[in-house]
Amino acid sequence: MLVLYHAPISTCSQKVRLVLAEKQLDWEGKSINFGKAEHLTPDYLKLNPNGVVPTLVHDGDPIIESSVITEYLDEAFPDHPVRPKDFKALAHMRAWRQYIDEVPTPSIRPISFNTFFVPIWSRMSEEEFWDYTERLPLRKHFYRKMGRSGFSPQEIEESLDRLAQALARMEDALQRSRFLAGDQYTLADVNMTPTVVRLEDCGRTDLWDRLPRVADWYERIKARQNFDIAYMPGSRDLGAHI
Ligand SMILES: N[C@@H](CCC(=O)N[C@@H](CS)C(=O)NCC(=O)O)C(=O)O
């Protein structure tokens, strides 16, 4: 029995939903509403002490961290693999995954947060914002430093520059293989997908205007069966779940 605590618009939840769909696994969803701070309730914090989504509960045991969850799913359910069997190819895939977790994944946050979280915070008074951030186990000081009005234009530009570098690295890799870590669709592609989708939803497809292999990769990613399942209604509507 697989239960996923997730949010439709959450990029980390989308990674897990892509893998669940690719592996054709049945799961029960429990949708978490950030606007109602459902990720910070005592019951949810018992499952995920970081107070973030996603959390996968498998036969009663919670598993947290999207990149850990996706690898766990591939280990626990070997059909329709999303990791190469060859150890060197696996190391190559993991290096990609680590790079994506370190560079593009945090770099999409400024543009994404300004679009998604700032409307929630702007409805709060300074005191309410302070009380809300006091409850955050993971990003209390990060959010306080950013403030209720979100990231500055300079911070947005810097993060878009990091994303442009990541897309250029993808273009280079896609000269040599069909997918990021070889000719097999793997967790490297899964990890990168939500960031590229979010860039499209924020109107920044210009970042791959001159990267034909990235454009082709993205079209192939969107044409896969797991895509429409993972991107359930509401997943791309940034204002819908506030
Ligand atoms: N490293 C974690 C990060 C999870 C994460 O940041 N989730 C976001 C949604 S994509 C969240 O729950 N944010 C709520 C918050 O920051 O308060 C993972 O990959 O699972």
Image (cartoon, rainbow, N blue to C red):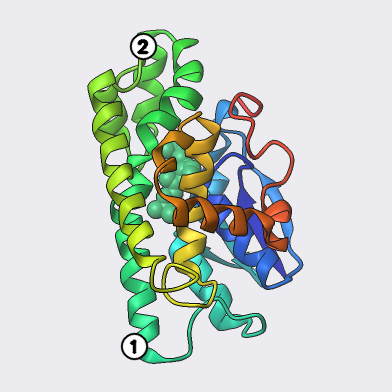
Q: Amino acid at mark 2?
A: Glu
Q: Residue at x 36, y 16 (%)?
A: 148
Observer-nearest residue: 204 or 14? 204
Height in image: 61 above or below 171?
below
Quadrant containing ligand 1 reads: top left
Q: Which residue is mark 2?
A: 127
Tag 1 secondary structure: helix
Observer-nearest residue: 115 or 28? 115
Which quadrant of the figure contains the N terminus?
bottom right
Whether label 1 touches label 2, CB < 8 Å? no
Residue 110 percent location from the top left of the image:
35, 31
Is residue 217 toward the left or the right of residue 105 in the image? Answer: right
Residue 216 percent location from the top left of the image:
54, 55
Q: Which mark is residue 88?
A: 1
Q: Amino acid at mark 1?
A: Lys
The image quarter containing residue 58 is bottom right
Observer-nearest residue: 25 or 168? 168
Height in image: 128 above or below 114?
above
Residue 169 percent location from the top left of the image:
31, 57
